């Protein structure tokens, strides 16, 4: 049966349930399946199913120790009535490309797709391995992922979640999405300080109070958990299915996917889809001005010793892209991966061999766009095609258009651009990109964007300005421990 081991040690094998419960391997590595060939399936059979049917097949391949009946229940619970689009992840045709909309979940962010499933996978996995503690998820958020995590864990039996965010450091929309969360098993708290302070505080709590109360264990929901990656594999199949059904491609045609990338989780899921047998051409990694990944993919040299830029696509602002380690393992093996990761933490850089680079480049392409290029892409897509996109999607859309215009081979054939957030989550930058007036206030900006574009505000965002605020705490970093203990 498929097992898992660390990217830094391919000897110690554990079950998929253990990998999900552990999250990160004890040696600091990430869990990967021990045998990629065991993931192979008949994609033609997969794309005959609806979204949940596809999810069941994919989950069953990755988590064979769960049992098909249990996977069925987990998938139903994860995607029942949570997404506003019946297809879960619909595809829109835009010009001569396609946009895969991953943002129709409860918080209008693509992370909803994975965070809807992770809590159910986690609670099942922990029972499966006889772990009886209640799971308390602790997270620090810079704004964007907190609400998706809260929503995913809300009302999931056997779990609680506490999210810390920097006081005054997130947008009104982001704050309200979190503090209006009504589920009784959720906690939200503003911390005086910046995101790093909150993040460092959370890391310290994991060391100091792994069990804040007897029968309660701390856990994290971050994107290195294999249980967060696997749900993302499904929508690569879903996009392919949509293109076949629309008559845009024939079964067997290769499709390229352009992915706005930060932590490399989303695009890594595409790699797994390809390994499983989906006819994927190139996976095109799109970076913003923080182009550490596109530099790596083009040169084989990863160098985090660089300036960090704050961009209008904040969820892609990154220097260390953790899921890349999974790709390194599959291409370079555990010995080299261990060596590279050590070099990254000590010297801040590493260089893979020419042969390893060539193997990565067989599957991946790359392109980076700065904020100005992204803004132009938003304006173009709207004015030419009437399609409104957010500031992350536009980095990938700009990459697609530039590659296409240059006649690049990686943009030949059908290209699907992954859209990772609703434009209404980043209204100010989107209004600016459209050349529209930008009123003060998040609510006013949403109304303005709707007036200018005719695209309605998603119901779950229109709601937040009138919902009751449930979480009002503001604390100092050194009070975080008491906060967690009192709510554990
Ligand atoms: C997280 C995020 C990304 C980056 O995805 P990774 O899996 O980290 O590469 C892109 N866009 C948005 C809106 C996100 O929230």
Image (cartoon, rainbow, N blue to C red):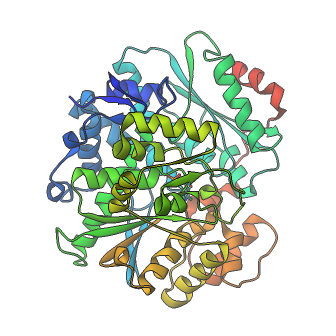
Q: Residue 457: image x %, image y %?
A: 59, 69
As rendered, which of 31 and 240 lies closer to the eye?
A: 31
> Residue at the spot x=67%, y=55% of the render?
464
Q: Quadrant of the C terminus?
A: top right
Q: In the current view of this chain or complex, which residue is farthest to the top? A: 214
As rendered, which of 327 and 111 lies closer to the eye?
A: 327
Please determine whether, in this image, residue 165 is positioned above or below residue 70. Answer: below
Please determine whether, in this image, residue 77 is positioned above or below residue 243. Answer: above
Q: Is residue 80 visible?
A: no
Q: Residue 299: image x %, image y %?
A: 49, 61
As rendered, which of 4 and 73 lies closer to the eye?
A: 4
Q: Quadrant of the N terminus?
A: top left
Q: Residue 430: image x %, image y %?
A: 65, 74
> Residue at the spot x=44%, y=85% of the render?
406
As rendered, which of 401 and 246 lies closer to the eye?
A: 401
Ligand 1 occupies quarter:
bottom right
């Amino acid at each position: 049966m498929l097992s898992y081991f660390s990217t830094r040690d391919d000897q110690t094998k554990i079950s998929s349930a253990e990998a999900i419960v552990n999250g990160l391997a004890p040696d600091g590595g990430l869990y990967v399946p021990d045998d990629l060939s065991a993931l192979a399936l008949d994609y033609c059979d997969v794309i005959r199913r609806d979204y949940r049917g596809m999810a069941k097949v994919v989950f069953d391949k990755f988590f064979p120790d769960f049992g098909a009946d249990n996977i069925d229940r987990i998938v139903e619970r994860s995607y029942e009535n949570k997404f506003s689009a019946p297809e879960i992840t619909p595809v829109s045709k835009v010009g001569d490309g396609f946009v895969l909309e991953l943002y129709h979940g409860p918080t209008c962010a693509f992370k909803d797709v994975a965070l809807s499933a992770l809590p159910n996978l986690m609670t099942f996995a922990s029972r499966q391995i006889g772990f009886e503690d209640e799971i308390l998820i602790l997270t620090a958020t810079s704004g964007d992922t907190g609400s998706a995590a809260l929503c995913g864990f809300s009302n999931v039996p056997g779990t609680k979640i506490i999210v810390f965010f920097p006081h005054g450091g997130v947008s009104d929309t982001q704050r309200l999405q979190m503090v209006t969360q009504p589920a009784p098993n959720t906690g939200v708290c503003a911390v005086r300080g910046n995101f790093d302070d909150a993040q460092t505080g959370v890391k310290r709590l994991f060391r100091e109070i792994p069990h804040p109360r007897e029968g309660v264990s701390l856990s994290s929901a971050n994107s290195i958990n294999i249980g967060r990656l696997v749900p993302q594999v499904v929508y690569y199949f879903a996009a392919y299915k949509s293109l076949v059904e629309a008559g845009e491609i024939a079964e067997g045609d290769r499709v390229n996917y352009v992915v706005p990338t930060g932590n490399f989780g989303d695009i890594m899921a595409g790699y797994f889809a390809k390994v499983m047998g989906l006819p994927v051409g190139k996976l095109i990694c799109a970076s913003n001005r923080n182009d550490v990944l596109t530099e790596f993919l083009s040169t084989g040299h990863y160098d985090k010793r660089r300036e960090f830029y704050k961009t209008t696509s904040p969820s892609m602002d990154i220097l260390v892209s953790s899921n890349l380690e999974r790709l390194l393992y599959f291409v370079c093996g555990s010995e080299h991966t261990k060596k590279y990761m050590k070099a990254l933490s000590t010297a801040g850089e590493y260089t893979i061999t020419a042969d390893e680079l060539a193997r990565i480049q067989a599957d991946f392409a790359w392109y980076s766009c700065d904020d100005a290029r992204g803004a132009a892409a938003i304006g173009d897509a709207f004015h030419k095609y009437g399609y409104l996109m957010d500031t992350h999607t536009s980095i990938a859309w700009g990459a697609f258009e530039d590659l296409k215009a240059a006649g690049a081979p990686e943009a030949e054939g059908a290209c699907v651009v992954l859209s990772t957030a609703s434009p209404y989550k980043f209204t100010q930058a989107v209004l600016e990109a459209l050349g529209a007036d930008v009123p003060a206030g998040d609510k006013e900006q949403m109304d303005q964007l709707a007036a200018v574009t005719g695209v309605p505000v998603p119901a779950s965002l229109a709601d937040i300005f009138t919902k009751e605020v449930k979480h009002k705490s503001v604390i100092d970093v050194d009070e975080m421990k008491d906060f967690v203990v009192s709510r554990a």
